[in-house]
Image (cartoon, helix red, strand yellow):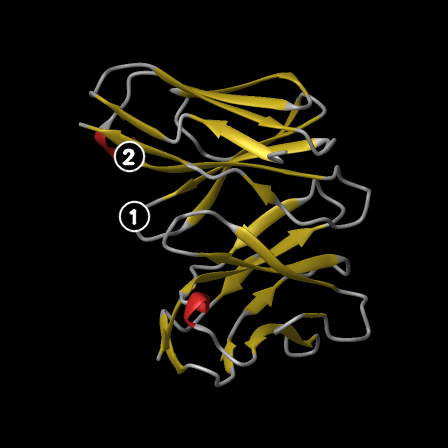
Amino acid sequence: DTAVSQTPKYLVTQMGNDKSIKCEQNLGHDTMYWYKQDSKKFLKIMFSYNNKELIINETVPNRFSPKSPDKAHLNLHINSLELGDSAVYFCASSQGPGQGTSPLHFGNGTRLTVT
Amino acid sequence: AQKITQTQPGMFVQEKEAVTLDCTYDTSDPSYGLFWYKQPSSGEMIFLIYQGSYDQQNATEGRYSLNFQKARKSANLVISASQLGDSAMYFCAMSRINTGNQFYFGTGTSLTVIP
Protein backbone atom coordinates (compact mmCIF):
# COMPACT_ATOMS: atom_id res chain seq x y z
CA ASP A 1 0.00 0.00 0.00
CA THR A 2 2.90 2.32 -0.78
CA ALA A 3 1.65 5.85 -1.43
CA VAL A 4 4.47 7.21 -3.61
CA SER A 5 6.88 4.69 -5.04
CA GLN A 6 9.91 5.40 -7.13
CA THR A 7 12.38 3.06 -8.75
CA PRO A 8 15.18 2.34 -8.66
CA LYS A 9 16.35 3.11 -5.13
CA TYR A 10 19.99 3.22 -6.21
CA LEU A 11 21.40 4.05 -9.61
CA VAL A 12 25.11 3.92 -10.37
CA THR A 13 26.16 4.81 -13.88
CA GLN A 14 28.95 6.32 -15.92
CA MET A 15 29.21 9.80 -17.35
CA GLY A 16 27.52 10.20 -20.69
CA ASN A 17 24.91 7.51 -20.13
CA ASP A 18 21.14 8.05 -20.23
CA LYS A 19 18.98 6.86 -17.36
CA SER A 20 15.37 7.03 -16.18
CA ILE A 21 13.70 7.12 -12.77
CA LYS A 22 10.08 6.07 -12.48
CA CYS A 23 7.50 7.35 -10.03
CA GLU A 24 3.95 6.31 -9.29
CA GLN A 25 1.45 7.51 -6.69
CA ASN A 26 -1.77 5.79 -5.60
CA LEU A 27 -3.12 8.68 -3.51
CA GLY A 28 -5.32 10.11 -6.22
CA HIS A 29 -3.36 13.37 -6.13
CA ASP A 30 -3.42 15.73 -9.07
CA THR A 31 0.05 17.21 -8.68
CA MET A 32 3.42 15.46 -8.84
CA TYR A 33 6.92 16.82 -8.41
CA TRP A 34 10.58 16.03 -8.82
CA TYR A 35 13.01 17.38 -6.25
CA LYS A 36 16.79 17.14 -6.18
CA GLN A 37 18.62 16.89 -2.86
CA ASP A 38 22.30 17.69 -3.09
CA SER A 39 25.15 16.59 -0.84
CA LYS A 40 24.42 19.45 1.56
CA LYS A 41 20.84 18.18 1.92
CA PHE A 42 19.34 21.18 0.12
CA LEU A 43 16.02 20.31 -1.56
CA LYS A 44 15.42 22.02 -4.86
CA ILE A 45 12.28 21.79 -6.96
CA MET A 46 12.92 20.67 -10.50
CA PHE A 47 9.51 20.07 -12.06
CA SER A 48 5.85 19.95 -11.16
CA TYR A 49 2.97 18.50 -13.15
CA ASN A 50 -0.73 18.96 -12.52
CA ASN A 51 -2.98 16.47 -14.28
CA LYS A 52 -0.21 15.66 -16.77
CA GLU A 53 0.42 19.33 -17.50
CA LEU A 54 3.78 20.93 -16.70
CA ILE A 55 3.26 23.81 -14.26
CA ILE A 56 6.69 24.32 -12.72
CA ASN A 57 9.92 24.07 -14.63
CA GLU A 58 12.79 25.50 -12.64
CA THR A 59 16.16 26.25 -14.18
CA VAL A 60 17.15 22.70 -14.96
CA PRO A 61 19.44 21.60 -17.81
CA ASN A 62 17.42 20.37 -20.75
CA ARG A 63 19.18 17.03 -20.36
CA PHE A 64 16.47 16.41 -17.75
CA SER A 65 13.10 15.62 -19.27
CA PRO A 66 10.04 14.72 -17.21
CA LYS A 67 7.22 12.68 -18.69
CA SER A 68 3.75 12.24 -17.24
CA PRO A 69 1.72 9.60 -19.10
CA ASP A 70 -1.15 10.02 -16.63
CA LYS A 71 -1.71 11.87 -13.39
CA ALA A 72 -0.52 8.92 -11.29
CA HIS A 73 2.89 8.71 -12.97
CA LEU A 74 5.77 11.12 -13.39
CA ASN A 75 9.01 9.77 -14.78
CA LEU A 76 12.34 11.54 -15.07
CA HIS A 77 14.72 10.87 -17.92
CA ILE A 78 18.26 12.18 -17.81
CA ASN A 79 20.46 12.31 -20.90
CA SER A 80 24.25 12.54 -21.05
CA LEU A 81 24.75 12.20 -17.31
CA GLU A 82 27.40 14.37 -15.67
CA LEU A 83 29.26 14.06 -12.37
CA GLY A 84 27.28 17.00 -10.97
CA ASP A 85 24.04 15.10 -11.46
CA SER A 86 24.96 12.85 -8.53
CA ALA A 87 22.31 13.47 -5.89
CA VAL A 88 19.19 12.01 -4.35
CA TYR A 89 16.11 12.56 -6.49
CA PHE A 90 12.74 12.60 -4.77
CA CYS A 91 9.38 12.20 -6.38
CA ALA A 92 6.45 13.70 -4.47
CA SER A 93 2.75 14.31 -4.87
CA SER A 94 0.10 16.58 -3.38
CA GLN A 95 -3.52 17.52 -3.93
CA GLY A 96 -3.95 19.89 -6.79
CA PRO A 97 -3.96 23.70 -6.55
CA GLY A 98 -7.16 25.26 -5.37
CA GLN A 99 -7.97 22.35 -3.07
CA GLY A 100 -6.48 23.83 0.06
CA THR A 101 -3.02 23.02 1.18
CA SER A 102 -2.06 19.41 1.56
CA PRO A 103 1.41 18.22 2.42
CA LEU A 104 3.84 16.78 -0.03
CA HIS A 105 3.99 13.02 0.10
CA PHE A 106 7.47 11.86 -0.85
CA GLY A 107 8.79 8.70 -2.38
CA ASN A 108 11.80 7.11 -0.73
CA GLY A 109 14.26 8.72 -3.09
CA THR A 110 16.65 7.51 -5.76
CA ARG A 111 20.33 7.90 -5.02
CA LEU A 112 22.04 8.59 -8.32
CA THR A 113 25.81 8.23 -8.48
CA VAL A 114 27.60 9.20 -11.65
CA THR A 115 31.17 7.95 -12.01
CA ALA B 1 10.62 35.83 -3.88
CA GLN B 2 9.62 33.28 -1.33
CA LYS B 3 12.19 32.27 1.22
CA ILE B 4 12.49 29.90 4.15
CA THR B 5 15.30 30.40 6.67
CA GLN B 6 16.50 27.87 9.19
CA THR B 7 19.38 29.44 11.10
CA GLN B 8 20.41 26.40 13.15
CA PRO B 9 22.48 24.00 11.07
CA GLY B 10 22.87 21.66 14.05
CA MET B 11 21.21 21.26 17.42
CA PHE B 12 21.75 18.98 20.40
CA VAL B 13 19.18 18.07 23.02
CA GLN B 14 19.20 15.78 26.02
CA GLU B 15 16.84 12.84 25.88
CA LYS B 16 13.43 13.64 27.44
CA GLU B 17 14.01 17.40 27.14
CA ALA B 18 12.09 19.70 24.81
CA VAL B 19 13.75 21.40 21.84
CA THR B 20 12.73 24.22 19.50
CA LEU B 21 13.83 24.32 15.88
CA ASP B 22 13.60 27.76 14.34
CA CYS B 23 12.06 28.66 11.01
CA THR B 24 11.28 32.05 9.51
CA TYR B 25 9.64 32.67 6.19
CA ASP B 26 9.14 35.51 3.81
CA THR B 27 6.12 35.88 1.58
CA SER B 28 3.72 38.56 0.46
CA ASP B 29 0.94 36.04 -0.21
CA PRO B 30 -1.98 36.14 2.25
CA SER B 31 -2.65 32.41 1.84
CA TYR B 32 0.12 29.93 2.48
CA GLY B 33 0.85 26.73 4.34
CA LEU B 34 3.75 25.88 6.61
CA PHE B 35 5.09 22.37 7.06
CA TRP B 36 7.76 20.48 8.89
CA TYR B 37 9.40 17.33 7.60
CA LYS B 38 11.76 14.88 9.25
CA GLN B 39 14.51 13.11 7.32
CA PRO B 40 16.19 10.34 9.34
CA SER B 41 19.52 8.88 8.28
CA SER B 42 17.64 6.27 6.24
CA GLY B 43 16.73 9.11 3.88
CA GLU B 44 12.96 9.16 3.60
CA MET B 45 11.04 12.40 4.04
CA ILE B 46 8.37 12.19 6.73
CA PHE B 47 5.63 14.79 7.06
CA LEU B 48 5.24 15.93 10.68
CA ILE B 49 2.91 18.90 11.00
CA TYR B 50 1.06 21.59 9.05
CA GLN B 51 -0.11 25.14 9.84
CA GLY B 52 -2.29 27.23 7.56
CA SER B 53 -1.80 30.97 7.39
CA TYR B 54 -5.38 31.59 8.53
CA ASP B 55 -5.33 29.08 11.37
CA GLN B 56 -5.88 30.82 14.68
CA GLN B 57 -4.48 28.09 16.87
CA ASN B 58 -1.04 26.54 16.80
CA ALA B 59 -0.97 23.09 15.25
CA THR B 60 -0.13 20.08 17.40
CA GLU B 61 0.54 16.45 16.47
CA GLY B 62 1.50 14.25 19.37
CA ARG B 63 4.88 15.43 20.66
CA TYR B 64 5.19 17.98 17.86
CA SER B 65 3.77 21.47 18.01
CA LEU B 66 4.21 24.41 15.71
CA ASN B 67 4.72 27.80 17.34
CA PHE B 68 3.19 30.07 14.68
CA GLN B 69 3.82 33.78 15.06
CA LYS B 70 2.36 35.35 11.94
CA ALA B 71 3.48 38.92 12.59
CA ARG B 72 7.05 37.74 13.05
CA LYS B 73 6.73 35.32 10.13
CA SER B 74 8.04 32.48 12.19
CA ALA B 75 6.94 28.84 12.40
CA ASN B 76 9.12 27.12 14.95
CA LEU B 77 8.83 23.39 15.60
CA VAL B 78 8.74 22.29 19.22
CA ILE B 79 9.49 18.66 20.01
CA SER B 80 8.61 17.70 23.56
CA ALA B 81 10.14 14.81 25.51
CA SER B 82 12.85 14.13 22.92
CA GLN B 83 13.61 10.54 22.07
CA LEU B 84 16.72 9.00 20.52
CA GLY B 85 14.67 8.30 17.40
CA ASP B 86 14.14 12.03 16.93
CA SER B 87 17.76 12.39 15.77
CA ALA B 88 17.38 13.46 12.14
CA MET B 89 17.37 16.38 9.73
CA TYR B 90 14.34 18.62 10.03
CA PHE B 91 13.09 20.77 7.18
CA CYS B 92 10.69 23.66 7.31
CA ALA B 93 8.69 24.27 4.15
CA MET B 94 6.15 26.73 2.85
CA SER B 95 3.59 26.34 0.11
CA ARG B 96 1.86 29.02 -1.93
CA ILE B 97 -1.74 27.95 -2.13
CA ASN B 98 -2.91 29.92 -5.11
CA THR B 99 -0.05 29.42 -7.48
CA GLY B 100 0.25 25.76 -8.30
CA ASN B 101 0.97 24.51 -4.80
CA GLN B 102 4.63 25.36 -5.10
CA PHE B 103 6.67 24.30 -2.07
CA TYR B 104 9.83 25.99 -0.78
CA PHE B 105 12.21 24.32 1.65
CA GLY B 106 14.67 25.63 4.19
CA THR B 107 18.22 24.34 4.44
CA GLY B 108 17.40 22.06 7.33
CA THR B 109 18.49 21.58 10.94
CA SER B 110 20.33 18.47 12.06
CA LEU B 111 19.04 17.40 15.47
CA THR B 112 20.99 15.02 17.68
CA VAL B 113 19.38 13.60 20.80
CA ILE B 114 21.90 12.74 23.48
CA PRO B 115 21.14 9.84 25.82
Q: In the displayed structure, does residue B38 sit left or right of residue B9?
A: right
Q: Chain of mark 2?
A: A
Q: CA distance from mark 1 to mark 2?
A: 9 Å
Q: For the image shown, how many numbered marks are present on the structure?
A: 2
Residue corresponding to mark 1: A39
Q: What residue do we see at 44% from left, 66% from top?
A: B85
Q: Which mark is residue B2?
A: none
- At label 2, which amino acid type do we have? Ser
Q: What residue do we see at 29% from left, 17% from top?
A: A80
Q: Nearer the viewer, residue B44 or A101?
A: B44
Circles 1 and 2: CB atoms closer than 8 Å: yes
Residue A73 drawn at (x, y percent): 61, 22
Residue B78 quadrant:
bottom right
Q: In the displayed structure, does residue A28 sit left or right of residue A54?
A: right
Looking at the image, is A69 positioned above or below residue A49?
Answer: above
Q: Chain of mark 1?
A: A
Q: Nearer the viewer, residue B99 or A2?
A: A2
Q: Where does the N terminus of chain A fall, quadrant-wise? A: top right
Looking at the image, is B74 positioned above or below residue A21?
Answer: below
Residue A87 drawn at (x, y percent): 33, 38
Of label 1 and label 2, which has the lower sequence position?
A: 1
Q: Secondary structure at mark 1?
A: loop
Q: Which mark is residue A86?
A: 2
Q: Is residue B1 visible?
A: no
Residue B42 drawn at (x, y percent): 38, 49
